[in-house]
Amino acid sequence: MAVTETPGIVALVLAAGAGTYLWRALGVALSGRINPAGAIFTWVGCVAYAMIAGLVSRLILIPGGTLAGSALEHRLLACAAGLIAYYLAKRNLFVGVGVGVAALMALTAGGG
């Protein structure tokens, strides 16, 4: 399929790119005028943390897909192991997530 045969797809890709870069350019233009310690940034940070907490809670308490086949106790223990590892590794997110995943895999594979 040649590019000339699909002008609609090309136009769609260009429009999506323009929309993406428009918001990026606006962010660059406004970044010098926004106070990162201001009320708006504090609110946005709180909303972001609340969304992450809600998603993690849902994954642990009401999982879907393959995760639903694991026991609640396993998910809770893996979460606790990940949090402990995160803090012991001086707040290293990679270590916390890795330990949590490894713990869930070990608990699920071991059956207990």
Image (tube, rainbow, N blue to C red):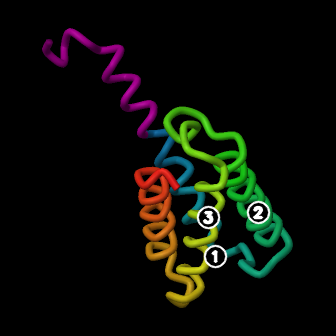
Q: Mark 1: which amino acid?
A: Gly
Disc 1: CA contacts within 10 A as few (<14), some (14-19) or many (>=20): few
Q: Mark 2: which amino acid?
A: Val
Q: Nearer the viewer, mark 2 or mark 3?
A: 3
Q: Which residue is located at x 68 percent, y 57 percent?
A: 52
Q: Circle 2 is placed at which residue position?
A: 44
33 w.r.t. 49: above or below: below
Q: Position of residue 93 (x, y in %)?
A: 51, 74
Secondary structure under badge 1? Answer: loop
Disc 2: CA contacts within 10 A as few (<14), some (14-19) or many (>=20): few
In the displayed structure image, the side of residue 52 where residue 107 appears, left or right: left
Q: Which residues are magenta?
A: 1-17
Q: CA distance from mark 1 to mark 3?
A: 44 Å
The reply to whether callout 2 and callout 3 are in contact (CB within 8 Å) is no
Front position in the image: 84 or 89: 84
Q: Position of residue 57 (x, y in %)?
A: 72, 52
Looking at the magenta stretch, what is its main secondary structure? helix
Q: Which numbered disc, 2 or 3, marks the residue that appears first in the sequence?
A: 2
100 w.r.t. 17: above or below: below
65 w.r.t. 23: above or below: above
Q: Position of residue 36 (x, y in %)?
A: 71, 78
Q: Mark 3: which amino acid?
A: Leu
Q: Is residue 15 magenta?
A: yes
Q: Circle 1 is placed at which residue position?
A: 32
The reply to whether callout 1 and callout 2 are in contact (CB within 8 Å) is no
Secondary structure under badge 2? Answer: helix
102 w.r.t. 69: above or below: below
Residue at the far top: name it: 5
Q: CA distance from mark 1 to mark 2?
A: 18 Å
Q: Circle 3 is placed at which residue position?
A: 77
